[in-house]
């Protein structure tokens, strides 16, 4: 049996939200596959209001506040999404 990749379940466990104004960052939606197996395609989706951009630990790219990321699962991993204001 293939080992389950639980990175999907833990993708949104940790959010570091940085805000310096009266408008607080608001998480409207976060979603991903509930579980995946090694080699499966996984898509993460998010919609965050009042964020200038989003970064995901392990990626050098700045993502839009409404965006998605598609990866191929290869190991158990936690992803940290951080929204910046």
Image (cartoon, grey):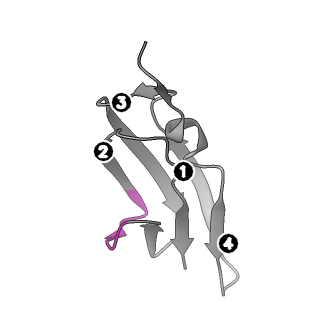
Judging depth in this view, the residue of 82 and 64 nearest the camera is 82
| Mark positioned earlier in the residue sequence (4 or 1) | 4
What residue range appears in magenta? 59-66
68 is higher (above) or lower (below) than 83: above
| Disc number lying in front (4 or 1) | 1
Mark 2, residue position? 71
* C-alpha separation, residue under disc 4 versus residue under disc 2: 29 Å
Q: Secondary structure at mark 1?
A: loop
Which residue, given by chain and number where applicable, does mark 3 sit on?
38
The alpha-carbon separation of the residues under discs 1 and 2 comes to 13 Å
Label disc, if present, on residue 78 of the rendered structure: 1
Q: Are marks 3 and 4 in contact (CB under 8 Å)?
A: no
* Disc number placed over residue 24 in the picture, else none: 4
Q: Nearer the viewer, mark 2 or mark 3?
A: 3
Of residues 28 and 81, the one nearer the viewer is 81
Give left or right: position of 23 versus 85.
right
* Closer to us: 53 or 23: 53
């Amino acid at each position: 049996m293939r080992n389950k990749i639980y990175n999907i379940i833990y993708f949104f466990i940790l959010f570091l939200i940085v805000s310096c104004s009266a408008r607080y960052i608001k998480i409207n939606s976060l979603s991903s596959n509930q579980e995946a197996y090694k080699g499966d395609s996984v898509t993460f989706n998010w919609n965050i209001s009042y964020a200038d951009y989003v970064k995901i630990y392990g990626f050098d790219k700045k993502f839009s506040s409404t965006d998605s990321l598609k990866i191929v699962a290869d190991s158990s991993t936690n992803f940290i999404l951080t929204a910046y204001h």
